[in-house]
Image (tube, rainbow, N blue to C red):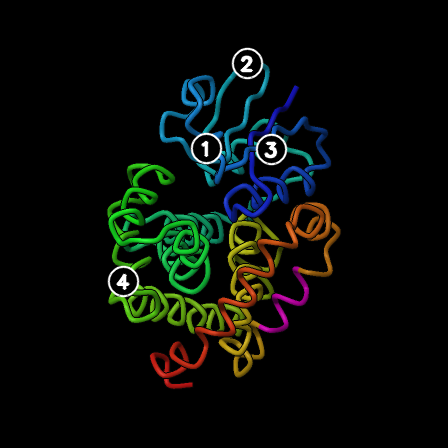
Amino acid sequence: MLELYHNHMSVCAAKVRIALTEKRLEWKGHLLNLIGGDQFKPDYIKLNPKSVVPTLVHDDKVIVESNVIIEYLDDAFPDPPIRPFGAYDRACMRLLLKRLDDGSDGIHHDMSVVSFGSAYREQLIKRVKKKQELDAEIDKSMNATSKSWLQQTIHEGVEAESFKSAIKNIDKLLDDFEAILNQSTWLAGPDYSLADIAYTSYMTRLEMLSYQRMWSERPRVTDWFNRLKQRPSYELGILRWVDPAYQKVLNDGGKRAWPQLSKILRV
């Protein structure tokens, strides 16, 4: 039995759903309302003390951290394989996974900053009337790890130094992808792998923010992302779970933020 505790718009949860689909595995889902605070309920904290999604439970064994989960799935269910075949390509894959999770320097952190600075901040601001109430809302709604950077990002939006640094890091990532894809078909060699799965939902988040102009002059990235979207796992792992209301928040917020963002990137 595979059970996945997830959220419809979580980039980390999406990568696990894609991996489950690519592995052709059946699973039972538990959809958490993160705005409603499901991640802070005692029963869930027992599974995931960090109060984040996703969490995978396999025959009563609990696995957390999305990149660990997708590697676990390939270990536990080796057919069909979704790791690269060569030792060097596997090393490249692991470096790309590490780049996502590398703390405050990681792409996951950067994408969280960009998502809140562009769009999600507006939801929190609408729920309060005073700055003090906004800080209290941040404290109530977010896990401890996120609180350390959220205040500046939510108060200042795209003008925050955290936002400027994050979007530049993501732009550098796309530069690196363009160079990688000039040498190979996929991110970690000739075959689709966990590296591609891991970044699919982050590319989708940028597209939902209407930031696809970030790769309009990067033809190899454009082609790679189009190929990702043509896979059945894209429909089953991402599109099927999109919440239209949240997609609109991202789309509208990203469009409003783009003029300032484009000045940061000089595009």
Kind of element beneath mark 4: helix
Q: Nearer the viewer, residue 266 or 158?
A: 158
- Residue 81 in percent (x, y) is at 63, 40
Q: Which of marks 4 and 3 is nearer the N terminus?
A: 3
Q: Which of marks 2 and 3 is nearer the N terminus?
A: 3
Magenta-highlighted residues? 222-228
Q: Earlier in the sequence, mark 4 or mark 2?
A: 2
Circles 1 and 3 in contact, beta carbons < 8 Å? no
Residue to which mark 1 is pinned = 37
Residue to which mark 2 is pinned = 60
Residue 149: which numbered mark, if any?
A: none
Residue furthest to the top:
60
Q: Is residue 138 left or right of residue 64?
A: left
Q: Could you say which quadrant of the image residue 224 lies in? A: bottom right
Q: Earlier in the sequence, mark 2 or mark 1?
A: 1
Residue 162: which numbered mark, if any?
A: 4
Callout 3 environment at 10 Å: few (<14), some (14 to 19), or many (20+)?
Answer: some
Separation of marks 2 and 1 at Cα, in angstroms: 24 Å
Separation of marks 2 and 3 at Cα, in angstroms: 18 Å
